[in-house]
Amino acid sequence: MLNINRVILYKHGIGYFERAGSIEGDRAVDLFFRTSEVSDVLKSLTVIDLDGGEIASVSYDSIKPLDELLRDISLSVPDDNSLLGLLPQLKGAQVEIQCGGETLQAMIVGIDQTTSRSADGITTTPSITVLTSDGQLQSLSMREIRSITLLEERLRKELEYYLTMHLSSKKKDIKKFTVFTQGQGTRRLQVSYTLPMPVWKATYRIILEPNRESIIQGWAVVDNTQDEDWENVSLSLVSGLPISFIHDLYTARYLPRPVVAVQEETSLAPPMMEEPVYRQERATKEIYPGAAAAPAPAPAAESYATTGLAQEMSFGHQAKRRTAPQGISSVNVQTRERAVGDLFQYEITTPVTIKRNQSALVPIVFKKFKGRSVLLYNEQTRARNPLTCVEMENTTELTLEGGPVTVLEGDTYVGEAMLQTMKPEEKRLVPYSVELGVVAEAKMESRQERTHFVKIVNGTLEACYLDVRQKVYVFNNKVKAERTVYIEHPRDLGWELTSTPEPVETTPTYYRFKAKLEPDSTARFTVHEKQERSHYYQLRNITSDELEFYIGQRYVNRQAAETLQKVLELKQQINDLDLDLGRAEVESRDIETDQKRIRENLQSLKEGRGEQELRTRLVEKLLSQEERLEQLQKSISLQRAERITLHEKINSLIADIRMEINLNQD
């Protein structure tokens, strides 16, 4: 028997088990696992003979149903009258029978029933008929037979296999592994494997003592969900994330193979010759040379038959091609890998005993550490009061696995907390209650400072200014004791601290400041922050009012102001051109509309005298409008060209403006 002597439990749901024991000579050692554990055992099982022996093989129960496992077994043992039901199946088997005081070797012939009458009634006595080596048939009463030994090894092994499989099937969800070893003398055998196990959990108690070092006591919650006791095992608890996965090695897998049909040729049937409907003899040509030759048989029938056979053969081959099995398919097994952090391990120094299907609290730490009670204020967590925390420094020289914490001050329960994993020498604030004796308030004040820097590049004026804000934290300490408070102030993107004490800690989302609260007093702590921002102005869209504003605010120097004044004058010329151009375009459209009306009227006039006069007047008006329209189009073209020229001058002037002014130098 190999007993469990070592157990290592991991935080990712795996347990490592090690068994050891002594064996002698060639030995088979049995191990039992649940069906759900078999794949993990097949993946991790390690067997070592520590004293020079060899491991021949490891066999395990198949996943096949019992009926399939026993399909090829010639024996069957009924549940009732098992011996009388088994012996007829051994007809012809060589056996050794101990009956009365003698031992007899013979072959089984069958079972007979002998009926006798007595005072108690009719009694039926079974007997076995055997054929001895000298050819005698003997009947032996089953009541006198003490033992029957099978002399044929094949039958003996079949019966053993049959009984073993039946026993295994009765054990619900249990599979047997058998380790076959070979060697001489007494040797030590070690077996190890991994199994899925419940995750071990950590829980702590922290005792805070005024003016004394604090104490932390840690326990591990360990669950033994196996069907076997852990008696005086060496227990280790490991935290971390080793890579682990489930891979089904237990289920038998079969790959489909292509089926290649045997090429066969159909035997030829005896041909049946057609009887001719007309016989042409050689003598006919000689006797009647002028006679016409008889027509050949119509080829349609032969062609039809031949074609049909060819199609049938062709279709047959196509059908074979369609139904041929496809190639062997493959199964891609994908796994996913993650980065593994450093592991730490609690090794329990004393042996541990946990009974089957029971759990236990196992001590993992009991040490002093640097810790005290402080306050932590976070407006988002609780706006009115700070939280009471344990300011911990892990001086236990152990990594503390994360878990729930119960906090005691002396012998008084004061709250609970959750501890995240802490490395040695790491510091952490662990909140465990609300401090109602301190009332807090947070107020935000902000203002915008004047522009301090201006620059012009690529036609854009950038005016830089500062947004300044301050948040005031007010604490009213009603407790008659000095308290230390940590203030968590949000870190906002783009804002930086100014005129504020350096934070003692910085987290990804908070600055953490430290302050003192005197007894029965009110304290204020102010956080000043600034953010540089900019306004952008496109000089191409400048107006006279904006230019006056830039000059008044000293955003531009004299040279830039003169250039921008020229830009405004050019923009005014463009505005005047746009007015003239708009009037010319409106007049041009009106003329075109009137011409369309005149042409429609000309088409409707007849050849009368009065209508001829009207036609003449309309034609003269069209000619006059054409001259005016030509003048307008020339004017519009010139104005558009001039407009483009003025815009180019504006772009050139603006592109030449490059300036930087620091307004704080005054």
Image (cartoon, grey):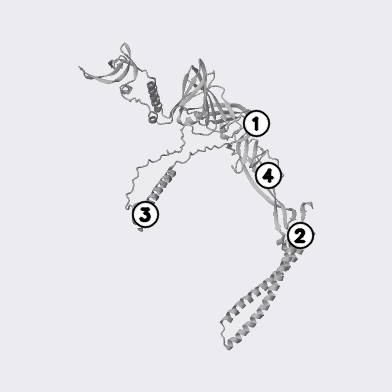
Residue 82 lies, with reference to residue 664, above or below; the image says: above
Which amino acid, mark 1? Glu
What residue sits right under mark 1 in the picture? 425
Picture quadrant where residue 607 is located: bottom right
Where is residue 631? Give x, y as percent.
69, 76
What residue sits right under mark 3 in the picture? 296
**Labelled pair 1, 3 in contact (Cβ < 8 Å):** no
Which amino acid, mark 4? Val
Which amino acid, mark 3? Ala
**Labelled pair 1, 4 in contact (Cβ < 8 Å):** no
Q: Earlier in the sequence, mark 2 or mark 4?
A: 4
Badge 1 local density, few (<14 within 10 Å), some, or many (20+)?
some
Seen at 57% across and 81% down, the residue is 603
**Labelled pair 3, 2 in contact (Cβ < 8 Å):** no
Residue 233's tag is: none
Disc 2 is placed on an element classified as helix
Q: Earlier in the sequence, mark 4 or mark 3?
A: 3
The CA span between labels 2 and 1 is 61 Å
Q: Earlier in the sequence, mark 2 or mark 1?
A: 1
**Labelled pair 2, 1 in contact (Cβ < 8 Å):** no
Q: Nearer the viewer, mark 1 or mark 3?
A: 3
Disc 1 is placed on an element classified as loop
The CA span between labels 1 and 3 is 114 Å
The CA span between labels 3 and 2 is 119 Å
**Labelled pair 2, 4 in contact (Cβ < 8 Å):** no
What residue sits right under mark 2 in the picture? 551
**Labelled pair 4, 3 in contact (Cβ < 8 Å):** no
Where is residue 76? Give x, y as percent.
34, 26
- Name the one closer to the observer, 217 or 100: 100
Q: Residue furthest bottom?
A: 609
